[in-house]
Image: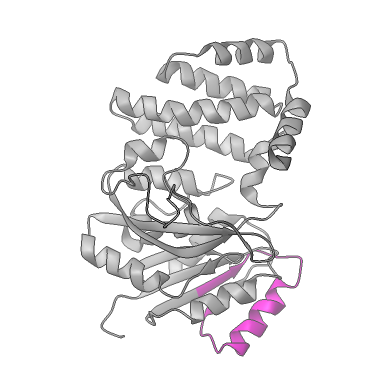
């Protein structure tokens, strides 16, 4: 397939010894063959590096393997690979997820269909647990026959990306490499990458959706996203506030501020409920510039001023929801 565009899969691994073989095998099994593979192990302290080396030999996979000596985080690790990537398109692929066989072929076909003004394509995802069992069939609302029950927008998605919940699941997105490099890749000052890069890319570029499940996302108890809901001194919430402040500077109209306010309020409430009161104040200072406070938010602000700790009650409530 030398006449087809080269796509780079950047596989990021950190303590994924139990999953990385399946992840790498799923790249090898792609129906699209013009693929460059770059693997970055971010100084795992389990047997991930050994598993990677064993899998490369077992499945006869040609790849560039960067085994970092010091842990530098997802953003910096990805940017190291992006700097040497040769593909016209690039996938940020976590080593605990799985690409279904037609993922790359369908992504490239979608890019070709929509043209160069599209910086990203995305699809649908099925959630699996640690054992690989399905726990949620689709990110989007579907009927019993699998037909979409909601409209997923394509084209100018900036206003929708600002809002909450996210427009799509992060593992399904594939980037046009030139667009990603134009914005200098991931922001290395942040604790996580996706919300920020979606905002910056969608400000001046279009996104395309195609209706297919091509990725399995593994839901792990220790996953990065779950840290939003439990931790004090939360670096993810701190980074999200920085992202929202950056987005506010990029906004050009009131409707964009309203969309952003949904994300700001959501994360501000999480900050308040998890005892991150200093961050909660920052979120609500920004929210008041974007939208009017609700009665609940006014109550939360009062509780923050008096240093009321909601964290135990909030964690109990989350646990009850999970049990039910």
Residue 199 spot, x, y in % from top left? 39, 42
Q: Does 42 lie within the magenta span?
A: yes
Residue 320 spot, x, y in % from top left? 73, 35
Residue placed most toward the observer, 273 or 117 = 273
Colour setting:
one colour
Res. 237 image quadrant: top right
Q: Is residue 255 left or right of residue 268?
A: left
Residue 247 visible in rendering: yes
Image point (43%, 34%), residue name: 246
Residue placed most toward the observer, 43 or 262 = 262
Quarter of the figure with the N terminus: bottom left
Q: Does 168 lie within the magenta span?
A: no
Count of numbered circles in the view: 0
Residue placed most toward the observer, 191 or 133 = 133
The magenta segment is 38-64
Quarter of the figure with the C terminus: top right
Q: Is residue 138 above or below residue 190?
A: below
Image point (66%, 63%), residue name: 14
Q: Is residue 156 left or right of residue 83?
A: left
Q: Residue furthest front?
A: 144
Image point (28%, 69%), residue name: 109
Q: Is residue 189 left or right of residue 149?
A: right
Residue placed most toward the observer, 298 or 212 = 212
Res. 251 image quadrant: top left
Residue 211 spot, x, y in % from top left? 35, 58
Residue 198 spot, x, y in % from top left? 41, 47
Res. 172 image quadrant: bottom left
Q: Is residue 207 left or right of residue 36?
A: left
Image point (41%, 30%), residue name: 260
Residue 88 visible in rendering: no
């Amino acid at each position: 397939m030398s006449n087809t565009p080269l796509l780079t899969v950047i596989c990021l691994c950190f303590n994924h010894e139990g999953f990385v073989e399946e992840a790498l095998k799923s790249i090898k099994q792609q129906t699209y063959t013009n693929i460059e593979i770059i693997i970055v192990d971010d100084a795992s302290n389990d047997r991930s590096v050994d598993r990677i080396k064993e899998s490369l030999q077992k499945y006869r996979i040609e790849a560039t393997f960067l085994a970092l000596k010091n842990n530098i985080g997802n953003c910096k690790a990805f940017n190291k690979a992006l700097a040497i990537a040769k593909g016209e398109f690039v996938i940020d692929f976590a080593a605990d997820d799985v690409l279904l066989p037609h993922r790359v072929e369908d992504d490239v076909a979608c890019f070709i269909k929509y043209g160069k003004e599209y910086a990203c394509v995305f699809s649908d995802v099925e959630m699996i647990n640690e054992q690989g069992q399905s726990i949620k069939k689709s990110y989007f609302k579907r009927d019993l026959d699998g037909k979409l029950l909601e409209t997923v927008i394509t084209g100018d998605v900036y206003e929708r990306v600002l809002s909450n919940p996210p427009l799509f699941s992060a593992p399904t997105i594939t980037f046009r490499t030139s667009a990603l490099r134009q914005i200098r890749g991931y922001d290395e000052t942040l604790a996580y990458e996706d919300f920020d890069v979606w905002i910056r890319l969608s400000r001046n570029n279009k996104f395309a959706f195609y209706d297919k499940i091509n990725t399995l996302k593994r839901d792990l108890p220790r996953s990065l996203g779950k840290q939003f809901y439990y931790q004090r001194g939360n670096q993810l919430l701190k980074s999200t506030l920085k992202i929202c402040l950056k987005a506010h500077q990029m906004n050009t109209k009131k409707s964009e501020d309203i969309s952003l306010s949904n994300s700001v309020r959501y994360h501000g409430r999480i900050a308040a409920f998890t005892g991150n009161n200093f961050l909660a104040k920052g979120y609500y200072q920004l929210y008041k510039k974007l939208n009017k406070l609700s009665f609940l938010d006014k109550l939360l602000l009062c509780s923050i001023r008096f240093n009321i700790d909601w964290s135990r009650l909030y964690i109990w409530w989350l646990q009850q929801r999970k049990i039910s």
